[in-house]
Amino acid sequence: MISSLFKKATFLLVIILAPFQWLSLFQVFGLSIKPVHISLGLVGIAVILGGNYKVWKSLLLGKFSFIYLYGFYLLWYVISLSWTQNLTYAIPLILKNIAYFGCFIAFTVLIIDLVQRGGFIQLSGVSALIGLLIFVVYMIYVFAHLGYNIFFEYYRVITSKDSASLLHWFYPKLFNFSLSALQDKETYLTALRNTVMGGIIIDIILLFMWFKILNNRVLKIVVISFIILGILLVLVSVSRSNTIILGLCLILPVLIRKRFLAKNFIRNKKILFAIPVLLIGIIIIYLLFFSNGSSPVMFVSSLAGILSTRINAIAQDARWLMYKSALTQIYNNAILGYGIGEPLLIAKNATTRVHNVFLASWFETGVFGMLLSFSWYSIIVMYLLKMIKSARFWTGQFPIEWVVTLPIISLLRVLESGAASFSLIEWLALALFFGIIKGLKKNPGKVEVNFLNA
């Protein structure tokens, strides 16, 4: 039997390694094997040999319709290979999605087990804190090795409102520092940056969950400081999708708990101490690393201006033209579609894959594939709405109002992602969501007692 310590260690590794999506160890069948994949392999060992038979049975043989619907969706994609022209592209794509789906199931089982044992919030919070710390230290190391002061560079491009550098300089430098040994030219994928930022958002959510139950004053200050650090990382990435996702994740818990906010704020006197200490710390950090005689207000104003420009550009986004072209071409072959990976013609000699899971499924695998994608997407939405409704009346210590933010990452990204499917980060967010709510449902009394004593 696999020990509880091993299970906790595998969970910690997955959360720590999740943002490091650009690190590749080797390739198998054209697919990159990354450190996070190895950690998920260990998760698979932990849940297969760990005695979680009741969890497996309830998950696979119970009423968890999402697994069945997504399984049928993948099966339809396999069937669609029969009319797909570009099998070299399609087969690795399907294999990757099947592997990710398997990782989702295994990670969900692990989380259910850990939630039932108790202490999950502490474990996930510590994992997120360590992971975020390692990510920031690694960024500082990479840029120092390249001869840059990362703090000064961020300050320079933000105050000069140089959004191009934020988009095409920082993360390409970070990615190619590790990829240079594998290729001759530099590469930069927007999807890769978005995936990394998705991992940071998961860390922020897990840290908020931990912060909610903490009683130690010093630890509260440390956790909220890393939350702010994570938020800054997402904002300065100027990723529109992740900025919107982050905004929704921060607003939704407030809306859910709005009737309790004023009472809890006054009752929790420790927060009154933590806020001024945190503000003083931020000012000190600013003076040490950013200030060159300019005011913090100017720095914040410049960043807000960059983000506003990026958000406003959504109205002119090329995706609208892409969606219009997709609907036009789908009309000519609506029943079976054009085959997996078939490029969408959006302009003269310009092709791409549809950046929307419903349109991509319809365009590639026909109307049945689109209906299947809509069905499993709807199941996630139904779970989310149900948990939002129940969170207002939650009496336990588990911060459900933060748990319900986890699927937002997945639900929004597949609507505009070039992959037109869940990335590994989005699968991990879904596994955390479903694993927590199903773990609480199976043994709520034990979980509540454990967290009350945490």
Image: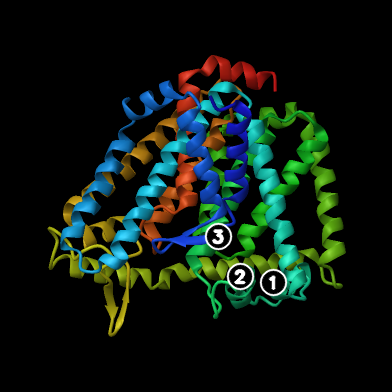
Of the image marks 3 and 1, the number of the one nearer the N terminus: 3
Residue at mark 3: 25
Which mark is nearer the camera, 3 or 1? 3
Residue drawn at x 57%, y 67% as measured from the top left: 308
With respect to residue 448, does 41 lie above or below? below
Is 196 on the left or on the right of 296, as rendered? left
- Nearer the observer, 275 or 367: 367
Q: Nearer the viewer, residue 405 or 84?
A: 84
Quarter of image, res 336: bottom left
In the rendered image, residue 438, in percent from the top left (x then y), is placed at: 45, 27
* Residue tagged 2: 306
The residue tagged with tag 2: helix, strand or loop?
A: helix
Q: Are marks 1 and 2 in contact (CB under 8 Å)?
A: yes
- The answer to whether residue 240 is seen in the rendering is no
The amino acid on which the numbered mark 2 sits, given as a three-letter code, is: Ile
Type of amino acid under label 3: Leu
Left or right of residue 114, residue 103 in this image: left
Q: 273 or 85, which lies in front?
A: 85
* Secondary structure of residue under mark 3: loop
The nearer-to-camera label among 3 and 2 is 3
Residue identifier under label 1: 158
Q: CA distance from mark 1 to mark 2?
A: 8 Å
| Residue 297 position within the rendered picture, expressed as x and y whole percent measured from the top left | 76, 64
Residue drawn at point x = 29 percent, y = 67 percent: 88
Residue 384, image quadrant: top left
The Cα–Cα distance between marks 3 and 2, rounded to whole angstroms, is 36 Å
> What secondary structure is marked by label 1?
helix
* Image quarter in which the C terminus is found: top right
